[in-house]
Image (cartoon, helix red, strand yellow):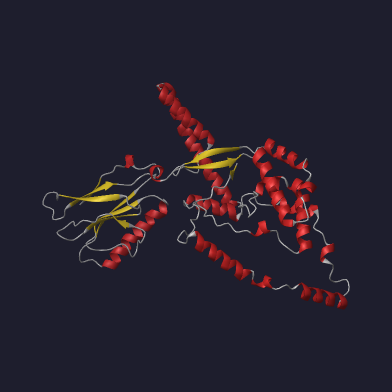
Amino acid sequence: MLTLACRPKYLPREFGQVFLTAVYIHPHANRSRAVATVSDCVHELESKATGAPCFVLGDFNRNDLRPCLPSYQQYVKCATRLCATLDCCWGNVKDAYTARKCHPIGSSDHDTVLLLPVYKTKLKAGKTTECVVKQWTPSAVETLKGCFDCTDWEVLCSDDIDETVDVVTDYIKWCESLVIPVKTVKLFPNAKPWVNRALKEIVCRKRDAYLSGDVTESKKVQTELKQQIKKAKTEYKEKVETQLRSGSMYDAWKGLKTMAGQNKAQICDTSLDLAEQTDFAEKLNDFYCRFDKHDFKTELTDVLDEVRTLSPGVVADPAADEITTECVEKVLSKVKVRKAAGPDNLSGRVLRVCCSQLAPVFAKIFNLSVLLHTIPSLWKQHHMSCPQKAQPYRTE
C-alpha cells in the first residue's frame, strides 16, 4: 500500500491539475499486455492536459514501465514485500518524492510506503533573472531619426572600408544607447504567458490592501482579480488562436512552443573549453575559405574580356552598376525586427525604423565593398559566446 503525503490544495501553483492512476497487475497476467494497457491509459491522460503531473502507483508485481514510459521515474527504492519491490510509484516529475518504508496495515503481507514530497517549485528551484528592455516609444524613435538626419556621414566615411564600417556601426549604437530609454525587468521561472500589465497592477493592489488590513477593500480587489484572470486567459487564448490562423509560420510555431512549454533557449555545448572551441572555429573557417587562397582576378578578367568580345553589350562593367539609396532603403524597411543581430550587433529595429536615414551611408558602404571586391571584417566575425551567458536586449 502506498500513501502520498500531499493533498491537491498544496500542489505547486505551476500544476493546475494532477492525474493519479491506481494499478494492480496479477502475478499470472500477461506482462506485455498489462504494461501496454497501463501505458495507453497514461498516454490518454497526458493528451488531456499537456504538462500536468501524472503518477501511476500500485502493485506491479515486478512489471517494469520503462520500456513503454521512458520519461517516467520510479520513486520507490525500498523493498515492499520481503526482499522484493512489488509496489511502485511512477511519475513524470523528476525527483518528486522520496520513499519511506512503514509497517504493514492489518494482516497485509505488503509493507506500507510513505511518499514524502521533495519537489521544489519552479520559483524556488529556478533563479530569477534580469533582462534589459528597450522602450521603442514613438517619441524616442522620432528623436533617433532626427539624430541621424543631423549627422554628416561624409565625416565618418573614409577609403578604408573596415574603418568606415567600424566607425559607422559604433556611431549608430552610440546614438541608440543615448536616445532609446531602457529599463530592467525581472523574469521569474514560473511566469505565466497570459499574465499582463493590468493583472499585475491588481495583484499589487491586493497586496497593499492586505498589508493595510482593510478587509472590505481586500474582498473587492479579490473579486476584480478573479475577473481579470479570467479575462487575461481569454485574451491569451484568442491571441494564440489568431496566431495559428494567421498563416504565419513564425507566429504558429511561437504559439505551439508556448503552449507546450518549450520556450527555452538552447544551451550550447560547453564540454569544449575556449581553446578547443577557437581551434574548431579556425578549422571550420579554413574549410570554407579554401577557395579564397588563390587569386582568380586574372582568370576572371580574361573570361570577361572573351565574353565581351564574343557578345558585345551582354556583360556590363560591374563597377558601372551602383547600388542605389532607394534599393537599400527598400531592403532595410523589410528587416525583421525579431531576428537576432548580426556580428555588428546592430538591432533589426533600428535598421527598419531609421531606414530612410541610414540608407545613404549603407549604400556608400555597399558600393565601396563592390568596388574593392572585399567584405568588411566586422561582417565576417564569429561570436564564441554561449546563448545562456549572453544577455541580449529585449524590445517592447
Q: Which one is in front, 64 or 357?
A: 357
- Residue 224 visible within the image: no
Residue under the image location 13 percent in, 53 percent down: 108
From this view, report whether residue 82 is shown above or below residue 236: below
- Residue 47 visible within the image: yes
Measured as percent of width and height from the top left, residue 228 is found at 49, 34
Measured as percent of width and height from the top left, residue 344 is found at 65, 53
Measured as percent of width and height from the top left, residue 3 is found at 23, 48
Measured as percent of width and height from the top left, residue 240 is found at 54, 48
Residue reaching furthest to the left: 107
Residue under the image location 58 percent in, 51 percent down: 251
Where, quadrant-wise, is the C terminus in this rendering? top right
Residue under the image location 30 percent in, 47 percent down: 118
Q: Which one is in front, 333 or 386?
A: 386
From this view, report whether residue 316 is shown above or below residue 74: below
In the displayed structure image, the side of residue 245 where residue 218 appears, left or right: left
In the displayed structure image, the side of residue 2 where residue 281 appears, left or right: right
Residue under the image location 34 percent in, 42 percent down: 11
Q: Which one is in front, 274 or 144?
A: 274
